[in-house]
Amino acid sequence: MYPRALCINSKVSNILHVGCFRDQWYMHKYFNHNVKCSNTSFCLSCSSPRLSTTRHGSRKLLVVRAVSIPENADGSAETNADSVARDVQLGGMFCLWYALNVYFNIYNKQVLKVYPFPSTITAFQFGCGSLLVLLMWGFNLHPKPKITRSQFAAILPLAIAHAMGNLLTNVSLGKVAVSFTHTIKAMEPFFTVLLSVLFLGERPNPWVVFSLVPIVGGVALASFTEASFNWLGFGSAMASNLTNQSRNVLSKKLMVKEEESLDNINLFSVITLMCFVFLLTTAIFIDGIKFSPSYFQLAASRGLNVKELFVRALVAGLCFHTYQQVSYMILEKVSAVTHSVGNCLKRVVVIVSSVIFFQTPISPLNSFGTALALAGVFLYTRAKRLNSKFKAA
């Protein structure tokens, strides 16, 4: 989890090197030559290894400020009960993340079947999220940010890419099976590597390239054997991969100053509001005004259950925002690699759940292609983790 806490049980004069993963060290230079340290535990908030030293006679000492001192007698950073409670909380958050994803995909598919206006549905979903964001800020459940011009300029391209990615995903969900859409979306690592090479000049290691082979092969096999295949559903899912992964490139190319950065919750909240404004305009331009009393009266006269449609659309919209909110909360507690593995398992849960719920017909070859693609995604996360370790070393 980060920001990480590292506990050192040593005399300060014996500390030679300390490594950590993220953010920055909170260390200070002390010029008092009468520094005396006992063999106690120092708890440091840390990240990237920047060391501050001072001289004590002929020896170099690394002097640190204790952020917190453990209260338990044995000097450990936390008790077993605290560790178990934290793991249970994190496990509960992952289960909630998965459950909300399953409910969103099922209800969203049901809505798109009878109300084939993905632009309007996507705008409605972001509208539900925007309402939750405004309530969160209005009731002071989370501090409201003050957006500067530089922040707005950096976030706007991310918001547009995020909006287009979700819109294209809904287009795909309206045309093909949920399981097939998510199988295609397993191609996201391929587009991540491709865009990083083209726009960031990053060169992937051979293990990362090797992991892309089963992903591409599995998606190709699943596509050839998919009963619900059509080109619009396939193409829109592929395009959503491209737009979603372009956010990663944009986030690296369009950086704001560190002191102007937003926390994950506020960043996602601001992006949600921007997406709603953008998609509302897009929906009116593409679909016209389909979310109106006159349209629903006409639809009801043709046999559409408007109340049931609205309830399912509302549940899908609330699940849509909440599962992404929980995802950002998890990302604050675990490493990016762990989050990626969790996202891979989430896709497995969604695919299996949708196949069972909708009784989607799948052939053995189709199942093998889907499994192969998801296995490739897992290998990709492992390869990225190994690459990070090599860079750190």
Image: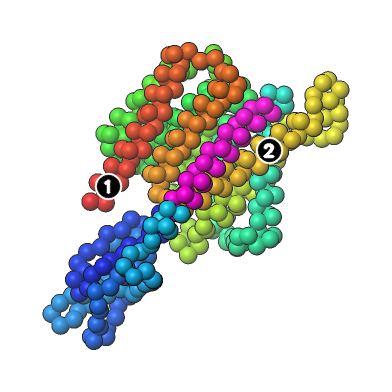
Residue 5, placed above or below residue 377:
below
Quick check: marks 1 and 2 in contact, CB under 8 Å?
no
Residue 295: % across, % down: 83, 29
Secondary structure under tag 2 reads helix
Instruction: Give the label, 1 or 2, closer to the camera.
Output: 2
Q: Amino acid at mark 1?
A: Lys
| Residue 95 horizontal/vertical position (percent) | 52, 41
Crowd rating for badge 2 (residues with CA inside 10 Å; few <14, some 14–19, many 20+): some
The span shown in magenta is: 86-111
Residue 161 visible to the viewer? no
User: Which amino acid type is shown beneath numbered disc 2?
Assistant: Val
Number of numbered discs: 2
Looking at the rendering, which quadrant does residue 289 occupy?
Answer: top right
**Residue farthest left in this picture:** 58
**Number of other residues with Cα within 10 Å of mark 1, as a class: few under 14, some 14 to 19, many 20 or more:** few
Residue drawn at x 39%, y 23% as measured from the top left: 372
Who's the residue at 54% across and 14% down the image?
A: 361
Quote the CA–CA distance across marks 1 and 2: 42 Å
Name the chief secondary structure element in magenta: helix
Residue 108 picture location, percent across and down: 65, 31
To which residue does mark 2 refer?
Answer: 315
Secondary structure beneath dot 1 equals: helix
Q: Considering only order in the chain, which callout, 2 or 1, is on the residue closer to the N terminus?
A: 2
| Residue 69, image x, y percentages | 37, 72
| Residue under numbered circle 1 | 389
